[in-house]
Amino acid sequence: MTRKAKWLSYLMAALLLSPVVFTLSGLDSPLFGQEAAVAEEAAPADDGVSAEMFTVNNVWMMVATFLVFVMHLGFAMLETGLTQAKNTVNILFKNTMIIAIGLLTYALMGFNLMYPGDFNGYFGFAGWGIFTDDAGITSAYNVGYTYWTDFLFQGMFAATAATIVSGAVAERVKLGSFLIFSVIFVAVVYPVIGSWKWGGGWLDAAGFYDFAGSTLVHSVGGWAALAGVIVIGARTGKYTPAGISPIPGHSMPLATVGMFLLWLGWFGFNGGSVLSADPGLTSFTLVTTCIAAASGIVGSTVLSWGISGKPDLSMSLNGALAGLVGITAGADSISVMNSVYVGFIAGLIVVGSVMLFDMLKLDDPVGAISVHLVCGIWGTLAVGIFSMNPDHTVGAQLLGIAAAAALAFPAALVLFLALKFTLGVRVDKEEELKGLDVCEHGQEAYGGFQIYDLR
Amino acid sequence: MTRKAKWLSYLMAALLLSPVVFTLSGLDSPLFGQEAAVAEEAAPADDGVSAEMFTVNNVWMMVATFLVFVMHLGFAMLETGLTQAKNTVNILFKNTMIIAIGLLTYALMGFNLMYPGDFNGYFGFAGWGIFTDDAGITSAYNVGYTYWTDFLFQGMFAATAATIVSGAVAERVKLGSFLIFSVIFVAVVYPVIGSWKWGGGWLDAAGFYDFAGSTLVHSVGGWAALAGVIVIGARTGKYTPAGISPIPGHSMPLATVGMFLLWLGWFGFNGGSVLSADPGLTSFTLVTTCIAAASGIVGSTVLSWGISGKPDLSMSLNGALAGLVGITAGADSISVMNSVYVGFIAGLIVVGSVMLFDMLKLDDPVGAISVHLVCGIWGTLAVGIFSMNPDHTVGAQLLGIAAAAALAFPAALVLFLALKFTLGVRVDKEEELKGLDVCEHGQEAYGGFQIYDLR
Amino acid sequence: MTRKAKWLSYLMAALLLSPVVFTLSGLDSPLFGQEAAVAEEAAPADDGVSAEMFTVNNVWMMVATFLVFVMHLGFAMLETGLTQAKNTVNILFKNTMIIAIGLLTYALMGFNLMYPGDFNGYFGFAGWGIFTDDAGITSAYNVGYTYWTDFLFQGMFAATAATIVSGAVAERVKLGSFLIFSVIFVAVVYPVIGSWKWGGGWLDAAGFYDFAGSTLVHSVGGWAALAGVIVIGARTGKYTPAGISPIPGHSMPLATVGMFLLWLGWFGFNGGSVLSADPGLTSFTLVTTCIAAASGIVGSTVLSWGISGKPDLSMSLNGALAGLVGITAGADSISVMNSVYVGFIAGLIVVGSVMLFDMLKLDDPVGAISVHLVCGIWGTLAVGIFSMNPDHTVGAQLLGIAAAAALAFPAALVLFLALKFTLGVRVDKEEELKGLDVCEHGQEAYGGFQIYDLR
């Protein structure tokens, strides 16, 4: 075990230190002084907006970046709350590493693999990261924000795709394998798919519309989550010959904190996707976002209450997230009234989807596949159905959904299978029953509390 | 039980789906395209401010909106922390539903019942909600923000009024009845009272001043909380022949998180009530807000420490909130020095008030009536005493306090009594002792933790 | 005990009410009306920036202020999570009091002891607080923000210095003595050192550079923490003849919340230290800040994983904070690539430092000295090594480090020793073992949970 851990640590170090190695090779040594120039120059707006407008746009985008950062804490709390106490340290560790890995790999290559746009490649290859490729770039990237704001906002987005997977494979995934998966997924798969639309690639040319990422972020993460769950299998004891044996989460306050922080973060996720502080568009987007979240809560609550006869908090929380994922593709182009429908239907869908995946014995402890993949698809389609912009068509939306699926799912499947047959992707049954915290981390999450095994 | 729950779920569905029904009647069908125009147009400032100033004003108001949203998480955590573990799911569920209900009902009718102003009605009737009434409204609502920002900021406010009630009736209120109360209170009572002052109604004309809502939000919620506590009665076992038997909260970390998040939210609650980003007014308001909160902590801590001989964390937390509620009516018009007094006195008041309500056997698990009603009244009076603006008088302030009381308290009393004699407002004694989580939700908040009954 | 508590409460009251006493002496009575004028005037920019630019700068600085406020919740959660359940109320109480004390004392004297600059005194004496000294100050303090924003932003900073100490002396410090220490440290020691550089004093003239406070905030707090730990001694049972007996924290979710909120707060801590919304500088600063945090996580994780053979969540969390403290002195002047090094090395340092202090039997429950003092020194030196600005030299940085040490450490030592020989600084052994919550506060943090003693 210790030997394996050491080996994994060396591998992690190698992967994560690659920026250092890369740079030490001397490629960017002349850039240091130039970066200074970039940072020090007064930020001029170069596209016809005043310095004041450029500054307020950039402030808005930085605020949006903070909010998307908060989503990482939200995901960590939601996943922690909806799983068992004995795996808490493991989940918190994964979520802490994902933001670190996400930002570093996105800086190394993801950002320039995805942007700048105006190319039509299928592999999204446009450059080599902010460490090495910023020589000629002024701080005013466009009218809405600086180069640095752009990187940080998009980097926070990129890391969320891996976080979605984390929840679905929780409580039995092998830590090292998950981290390696995250590195590759955030560094390559997510940015390539993103480049097709947001980088100005072929999907963009084909008329596909995805305002803030129902497909490009949520379904991409959701497909990977589905692949992970298929390869790794269900938690021991979840599906028994006698039927489904629910494994309740260990802290509903943490789960609720997670939902509220994710909603808060979505103000930046959607509001920031306007890419400027345009008053009408940003505030309209916030209204549709909130109305869809509220309707999602109502939809999932009413349906689950009706089915089970009890008001189910987990379903209400997932309903909010379902509504948020659902409106994400069209938050700027669906009317307030229709955002009620989009959110309400997402709330209904998430309840049905959670039940369906349980019938299929695909074990997803936090409902990530239902929320992010299924409602991500719904939200993308909803643009075709409800958008106020006549250029948005159901056909183009279906093309985008299919394109994302066609790369994200097989890529994640191959990655997880490759890891399965080398390092392994699943902890031993004994470890799983004893808990990952004690077995993998040698540490308990709740010192001094009496915790008994629920099963 | 299941039958009753189903019935309630149908009722909830009917109430909450009313926007959908309403719209399907065809009233707003021609608006969809027009909304598109609203959202897409570049946002011009139409009242003599530059596009840049309008944009920065709107950014500030959106940030303030996010912060008021955070207050809902703050309320949820404070209420959860200060109550028993066995009722946690119930409290989190209520708080999740309130924000959903609050936004949807405010969109349906509350917003236009309260605004736009310049009318003098006693019933505040001005329109029928943003779903149907936005045809002629451009995105630039005034110099400070767009129509959408205005709705969302005010909608977040509206929902807090119901949240205040939630804390006071916690641990024994019947879930369905509470939700019905919230729908009606947020949809009708809160906006009508708000229209009297903020909608430009008769209280405004009478010289009453309430900057950010010590009366219009906090005492309105507080009066409803008092009515609820009177109708529903104390928790079983709180007041015994042998005296008061305190029921300690189950998580002081969550309660502390709640206080800090509420303080954070108050930056938006008060800072946003400037209704623009005016540098002097917004930042002055933030200083008085923080100084009052700090003084409130000192006041409540010193007094409760002196009385009990022990530093009492719950009282320190309530002291901060008391100071915040206290300064809310005059945060823009009371000097920094006097904000020390306002906050310090609020901190003293909250300690005395909590003891007084316990003597009166009015059981308020989180001290909501003391914080929001009593300190709300104090803060409103403080404007008359300390304001730097000579137009603010004690007389007008008393009129406003009395007017809010005269509608909020009887309206809430009638609502709670009507619910008491139909659906019932209180769970069975057995349910109360066993806990609402297991009995109403079939779910425990802390899976795997050993929790024993404190009583 | 009760008698002592009463005595302490009177002392606290006297100290904390001093602003009131001070003012009642009549010094500021003519100012109230003038403050009104300050707040009411439209905020003109008086240094050649447009009203729009002044407004957006001020909005940015207010947002930064909110984020630094959030750090206080972050510190509270980190400290709570990494210590034992039986001392939770005590820790939450301390952290609630610190923000109240910090803001009030900074308003009374700290702010004007530290600012406004352009003086060269060694005692930083420039005025007597915002309650009494704002007669001639317009709301536009400079191009970046108003007088009020400046006070609140700097006041939030000041309070963090005392919070750092709180973590190091946790679980055995006497509450009253700690509060008295905090009052004096925040009111006098912190602002005097700050005035040397940020107030335009002699260290500034000597070429020392500290962008956002690796030295002026973090090492100043860290030196005081070291002095406190030396005077107060280790927790009972930590260092036994048989070796070091670790005392695990009681809630890793709370500790993780703490780290994420501190990171979030650092966006304001560093981003706000630009003192305007300059798009290039602010966003560049955010990128170096985040990259250093991410690298700090990787550095501490790889090293601690390599050493112990297990991925250690506490070390990963401290690695993030180490990276953040490390980049704080040069976040605006170190390239993105070099911020990887600065953060990574900080992550390595914090692991070694925690082990070293344990070998020296200096018991620091949360690693505050390693994170804030040791990495604060590293970050200050890093400016001399990596800065893109040729004016920054290792020599001047060493001077600044030494100067801060030369006042902060002896001052804190004298304060703690004076308290030790008068009121005492450490609780009885029996109290320590039973827990401060029950003994000092008469209140348990987790009502109803079964908690057993780990030792």
Image (cartoon, coloured by chain):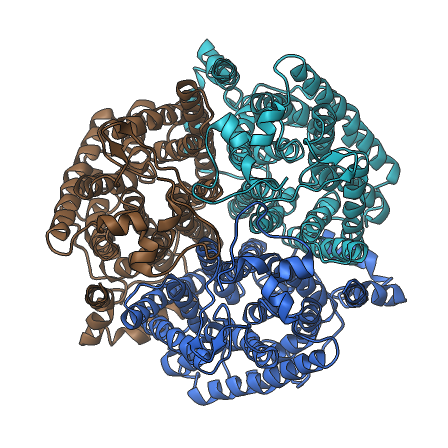
Chain colours: A brown, B cyan, C blue
Left or right: B84 in relation to A383? right
Viewport quadrant of the C terminus of chain B: top right
Left or right: A236 in relation to B102? left
From the viewer's perspective, is residue B267 above or below residue B203? below
The residue sitting at 43% across, 34% down in the picture is A317
Residue C305 x/y as whole percent: 29, 68
Residue B237 x/y as whole percent: 69, 34
Residue A212 x/y as whole percent: 34, 40
The residue sitting at 11% across, 55% down in the picture is A422
Q: Nearer the viewer, residue A242 or C284?
A: A242
From the viewer's perspective, is residue B221 above or below residue B62? above
Residue B429 x/y as whole percent: 63, 25
The residue sitting at 44% across, 69% down in the picture is C246
Left or right: B204 in relation to A440? right
Q: Nearer the viewer, residue C171 or B333?
A: C171
From the viewer's perspective, is residue B336 above or below residue C15? above
